[in-house]
Image: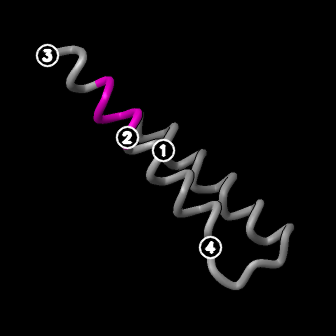
Amino acid sequence: MIAIVLILTFVGYKIDQWLGLNIPIFMIVFIVVGLAAYIYKLIKEL
């Protein structure tokens, strides 16, 4: 799961670079989505 969060962070960073954004919006959104998916999976396994 850590790998998925890191991959999503990298993809968000690259999208922000490609669009030329000063604020890393996509990186933040992808980090939140990755963490939410990780927490959902963790709770579901309990």
Report the residue that reaches farthest toward the bottom. Answer: 22
Write down the quadrant of residue 25 in the picture.
bottom right
Per the picture, the main secondary structure of the magenta-coloured stretch is helix
Whether 29 is drawn above or below 19: the answer is above
User: Pointer 4 and pointer 3: residues touching (CB < 8 Å)?
Assistant: no
Marks 3/2: CA–CA distance: 16 Å
User: Pointer 1 and pointer 2: residues touching (CB < 8 Å)?
Assistant: yes
Q: Which residues are magenta?
A: 36-41
User: Pointer 1 and pointer 4: residues touching (CB < 8 Å)?
Assistant: no
Marks 4/3: CA–CA distance: 34 Å
User: Pointer 1 and pointer 3: residues touching (CB < 8 Å)?
Assistant: no
Compare marks 1 and 3 and give the one earlier in the sequence.
1
Marks 1/4: CA–CA distance: 14 Å
> Of the numbered discs in the image, which one, if any, rests on residue 24?
4
- The local secondary structure at tag 2 comes to helix
The residue drawn where x is 75% and y is 62% is 14
Check disc 3 and report the residue beneath it.
46
Say what amino acid the circle numbered 3 marks. Answer: Leu
Seen in the image, is 26 located left or right of residue 4? right
Say what amino acid the circle numbered 4 marks. Answer: Pro
Check disc 1 and report the residue beneath it.
33
Marks 1/2: CA–CA distance: 5 Å
Seen in the image, is 18 located left or right of residue 11? right
Write down the quadrant of residue 45 in the picture.
top left
Check disc 2 and report the residue beneath it.
36
